């Protein structure tokens, strides 16, 4: 799972195995570790409630209704889920996307579990 942050937009990209696991109701998580032993974690978890985002000392947790994640995991045409959450001074945009193979190969990067890039066809 990859995390990209740009201002008030959080974007997660998930490979095929991660999308399949979410479709089965299994949360997905990852972490970036730092030399001092600290780690910044991020997590995507199915929920029975509404969509939400939490930031705490554990990192970032995005919650998406289980039914929405299951439908997305099964739909071969739907690339992502986009939601906007109201803030006191704007919105937090959540993008959850299937991770496609790169059009140009990258040395040292395993792309075998990514989705076929539609632009490559």
Image (cartoon, helix red, strand yellow):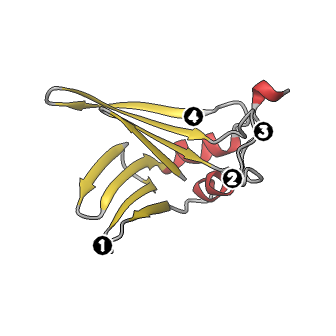
| Residue at figure coordinates x 57%, y 34% from the top left | 80
Query: Which tag, 3 or 4, sits closer to the chain's start?
Result: 4
Q: How crowded is mark 2: few (under 14 residues within 10 Å), some or many (20 or more)?
A: few
Mark 3–mark 1 Cα distance, whole angstroms, equals 38 Å
Rendered position, 51 above or below 25? above
Q: Please give the residue where the numbered disc 1 appears in the rendered image.
A: 36
109 sits left or right of 48 in the view: right
Query: Which tag, 1 or 2, sits closer to the chain's start?
Result: 1
Quadrant of residue 91 within the rendered picture: top left
Q: What SS does tag 4 mark?
A: strand
Mark 1–mark 2 Cα distance, whole angstroms, equals 26 Å
Q: Which of 51 and 57 is in front in this view?
A: 57
Q: Please give the residue where the numbered disc 2 appears in the rendered image.
A: 109
Query: Which tag, 4 or 2, sits closer to the chain's start?
Result: 4
Residue 103 screen position, x and y as percent = 75, 32
2 sits left or right of 116 in the view: left
Mark 3–mark 4 Cα distance, whole angstroms, equals 14 Å
Q: Please give the residue where the numbered disc 4 appears in the rendered image.
A: 80
Q: Please give the residue where the numbered disc 3 appears in the rendered image.
A: 116
Rendered position, 36 above or below 106? below
Q: Residues within 10 Å of mark 3 (few under 14, many from 20)?
A: some
Q: How crowded is mark 4: few (under 14 residues within 10 Å), some or many (20 or more)?
A: some
Q: What SS does tag 1 mark?
A: loop
Q: Which of 72 and 36 is in front in this view?
A: 36
Q: Are marks 3 and 4 in contact (CB under 8 Å)?
A: no
Rendered position, 30 above or below 97? below
Mark 4–mark 2 Cα distance, whole angstroms, equals 23 Å
**Furthest residue toward right:** 121
């Amino acid at each position: 799972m990859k995390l990209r942050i740009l201002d008030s937009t959080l974007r997660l990209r998930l490979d095929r195995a991660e999308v399949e696991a979410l479709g089965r109701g299994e949360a997905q998580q990852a972490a970036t570790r730092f030399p001092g032993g600290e780690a910044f974690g991020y997590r995507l978890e199915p929920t029975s409630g509404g969509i939400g985002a939490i930031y705490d000392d554990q990192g970032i947790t995005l919650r998406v209704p289980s039914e929405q994640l299951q439908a997305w995991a099964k739909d071969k045409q739907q690339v992502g889920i986009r939601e906007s959450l109201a803030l006191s001074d704007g919105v937090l945009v959540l993008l959850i996307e299937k991770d496609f193979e790169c059009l140009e190969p990258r040395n040292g990067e395993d792309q075998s579990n990514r989705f076929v890039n539609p632009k490559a066809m």
